[in-house]
Amino acid sequence: MKTTTTIAALVYSLTSAASLQAAAQTGYGAQLEGFEYPYPQHRFEFESQQQSLSMGYMDVAPNGTANGRTAVLLHGKNFCGATWESTIKTLGDAGYRVIAPDQIGFCSSSKPRGYQFSFGQLAKNTDALLASLQIEKATIIGHSMGGMLAARYALEHPARTEQLVMINPLGLEDWQAKGVPYVSIDQLYQSQLRTNAEGIKAYQLKYYYNGVWKPEYDRWVDMLYGIYTGPGRDIVAWNQAQTAEMLLNQPVVHLFPRLTTPTLLMIGGMDRTAPGAYLAPPEVAAQLGNYPQLGRDAAAAIPNATLVEFPELGHSPQVEAPERFHEALLSELEKLSQR
């Protein structure tokens, strides 16, 4: 049995290495040209900060009987709208219209060289998209960095926010206040230029999937790294550095007591994501990213909040255990709608 297990592990290791090598050779365009999205993409053209920008988004109709509700899915920093593939299908099957945008600076959307990135600005961009689609109210669902954006959106645009869902959001603690030193955009840019497929996989394996890799995760490594190997590598790295600086310096934890929208927090308890922790002294880094406690503290701070915990899951419970996650999501959304 031990020999069989060892051989199987070796075969998987070689297969995984081959997949990563394929990802390194893909080379997508600066707006992810060449990557196949799970649903047709649309473009929202608008003016922001004295320049013309284009936001890619998916607008997916309900599959079957519509329930009259719309869900807006906000991706994280190391994610794209495409990563919501199974969530889009689940919500569509339940009767939701689903909007999944790529934020400016990410994935299929414009990569401006000079842009003042802030969660307030990204929330304003998202609201302009929803207004253009004549969506009056929506359930705003954000994951990771998208959870930070969702919180800011709900605070700035409460009339359009019917419900708020945050899935392992970043920003549940103020990293700089806890001792993480400031790092400049120039330093972050140099770090981004060193991005490679093996590093992406190692990070996801540790924080997203608890050391258990499945072949279907390779697609997301390919998506992330492929955009670094194409002709837009420099501007992609620059925007990623700008948005890294944004999330490091704009925590949302201080906003929570002001939220008035019915809120659902969904927390994978094995997550220990803490951007910037690698820059902090060891004794500081060791105290960061305690998601079980951070989730409970956030739920206590947000009026009208519900906490759902997945103790054995990591940073991306919707990808790691989609059936369990989506069952809980639909059940809790129904409860929120009855409040």
Image (cartoon, helix red, strand yellow):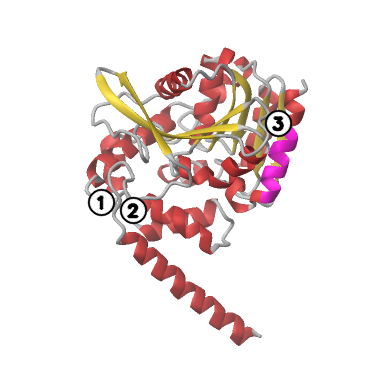
| Residue on which the image places disc 1 | 230
Location of residue 262 (image quadrant) = top right
Instruction: Measure how far apart labels 1 and 3 are at the Cα level.
Output: 40 Å
In the picture, the disc for residue 333 is 3
Q: Is residue 324 magenta?
A: yes
Mark 3 surroundings within 10 Å by alpha-carbon count, few (fewer than 14), some (14 through 19), many (20 or more): some
- As drawn, is 120 to the left or to the right of 68? left
Q: Position of residue 30 (x, y in %)?
A: 28, 43
User: Going 45% across and 72% down the picture, which residue do you hit?
Assistant: 15
* Amino acid type, callout 1: Gly
- As drawn, is 228 to the left or to the right of 15? left
Q: Quadrant of the C terminus?
A: top right
| Residue 45 visible in this rendered orientation of the protein | yes
| Residue on which the image places disc 2 | 226
User: Going 66% across and 23% down the picture, which residue do you hit?
Assistant: 301
Return the residue found at the far front: 64
In the image, residue 304 above or below residue 179: above
Q: Which residues are magenta?
A: 323-332
